[in-house]
Image (cartoon, helix red, strand yellow):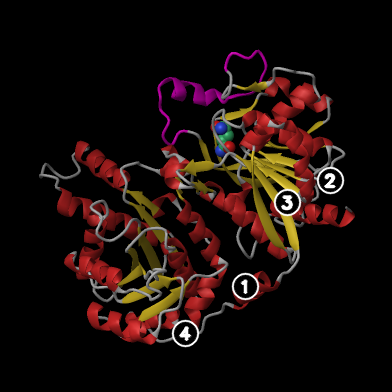
Amino acid sequence: MARYIFVSGGVMSGIGKGIATASIGRILKSKGYKVTAIKIDPYINVDAGTMNPVEHGEVFVTDDGTECDQDVGNYERFLDENIYDKNYMTTGRVYQNVINRERNLEYNGRCVEVVPDIPNEVITRIKAAGKKVEADFVLIEIGGTVGEYQNMLFLEAARMMKLSHPKDVLFILVSYFPVPKMIGEMKTKPTQYAVRTLNSAGIQPEIILARSVLPLDEPRKRKISMFCNIAKEDIISAPDVKSVYEVPINFENENMGNRILKKFGIKPRESDLKEWRKLVKLIKNSPKIVNIGVVGKYFETGSFTLMDSYISVIEAIKHAAFSENKKAKISWISSGEFEKNPASLKELKKYDGIIVPGGFGNRGIEGKIKAIQYCRENKIPFLGLCLGLQLSVIEFARNKAGIKDATSREFNSHSKNLVIDVMQDQKKLLEDKHYGGTMRLGAYDCQVQPGTISWKAYKAWVPNETGPYIISERHRHRYEVNNDYRKLLEEKGLVIAGTNPKKNLVEIIEVKNHPFFVATQFHPEFKSRPLKPHPLFKEFIKTAINCQKKH
Ligand code: GLN
């Protein structure tokens, strides 16, 4: 039987609950346990796919094609385990399933009620996710903050689970301790209120993680212990860190893993975080920088600009740089600037490599195409991801194949030369306005062609292959390279380095006589892990470093 650890948040959101959950998972895994993690998002949306990145940050995609919260990406990166559709839950999904079952007469004619039927559905899903991978520990992160109306039914599910399996369920509260500038002292009252609110839902936190700019000191530990009814040693300090990868090490320095085991009545166990410690040491010491520019469309909310929608790209760049003993300095380049002022394109020369990541819609497109042209012509290492591939093909068609009005149906459906067109099976879905969860999603095969840069890079995954071989990568798109133009583009020097063997879709393109110009229809960033950098990112960073040496 699995054991369940619920992680909820106090005081405010954005304090690193996801990283805390992922780090606890890593620690338990390092003690030899099979661990999985579940994310609960309390909103009505059935998944994250239909949400604006300003609202929600990155949409992460699993192998089995779920569009979910970016925390699932953190779990995969920290645990080095695949997370599945079953591990993601929203209020919308839970209700949808209950309503579908009611329609199928699965409740045998009885009245279906919010309580207990909704929490019961939540519990069924939690157990199923643990069972799927035969987990020893299932971590369940409840999104939002304690006291919100939205996540009450999930807390209720947690309470009910504790009631039926008192020895197998643990509650952790990740709470925030502000240090207001004008007071200069860390305040505990907001957390006291958070605990009281949790208590009123019938839950007593058994471990409190104290997130703050500073470590928690003795007097405050005493206060929290006293007012929140918790032993002092169960209050764990979690001050800000420079790199999120330090968090498991910091937690383990506080003996977090064995404290958790003790709560479950399990004997202490050694943890093996050797490789992870090495990584953290490297992150802290690596002095040399590789400069990567990400040309994107950035999202402004009031006075703030969000980069969160590219978190997996950021992490994949970092992983690759670490593996080359470098630190990546990532700069955000707004493509709109190139549209207003094309002279600013030469700024791109300052970078060792440029990435054009995924995206949707018209804004900033022409600027990105200009940046891609600049990278191609000036031999700046370039990696295009999803939309980045589509724009690379458009750029190539316009400037190398003389198709001046080349574009994608996504931007201008009236153009005569749609070198990027909607996929056949997507047409009807769009006409019927079936937008949610209907893109080409999740893992698909790609056959990689010998002699290409990609073939060389992916050999890291299949070291013994000598001919073409198959890899699998995750997708999230509706449009694709129009095969009618393939021959012409190839004649003009575009390299089709990877294709989907079943549907003959273009998956990877390259250009010749360039140190590194590779673009993928899929999102390699979703499969990068801190100790296992993604081969394409690694090769890209390696080339960027070599080019840096040259100039
Ligand atoms: N908007 C493009 C499409 O739907 C690219 C999507 C992406 O970059 N994820 O095909």
Q: Hey, what amino acid is under mark 1?
A: Val
Say which element carries label 1. Answer: helix
Marked residue nearer the N-terminal end (4 or 1): 4
Q: Nearer the viewer, mark 2 or mark 4?
A: 2
Does the stretch in magenta take in 418? Answer: yes
Find disc 2 in the rendering and name its residue.
515
| Residue at the disc numbered 3 | 458
Q: Amino acid at mark 4?
A: Arg
- Residue depicted at 44% across the width and 67% down the height: 20
The disc labelled 2 sits on which kind of residue? Pro
Is residue 538 positioned above or below 343 on the image? below
Q: Counting other residues with Cα less than 10 Å from the Cα at mark 4, is it few (<14), some (14-19), or many (20 or more)?
A: few
**Near-viewer residue (466 or 283):** 283
Q: What crowding class fits label 3: few (fewer than 14 Cα within 10 Å), some (14-19), or many (20 or more)?
A: some
Q: Nearer the viewer, residue 257 or 133?
A: 257
Establish if 316 lies above or below 345: below
- Mark 1 surroundings: few (<14), some (14-19) or many (≥20) residues within 10 A: some
Whole-angstrom CA distance, mark 3 to mark 4, is 37 Å
Q: Nearer the viewer, residue 43 or 291?
A: 291
Query: Percent x, y for residue 135?
Result: 42, 66
Closer to the chain start, of discs 1 and 2, is: 1
Disc 2 residue: CB within 8 Å of ligand 1: no
**Residue tagged by mark 1?**
280
State the mark number for residue 205. Answer: none
Q: Which residues are magenta?
A: 413-438
Characterize the local packing of mark 2: few (<14), some (14-19) or many (20 or more) Cα atoms within 10 angstroms.
some
| Observer able to see residue 260 | no
Residue at image mark 4 = 269
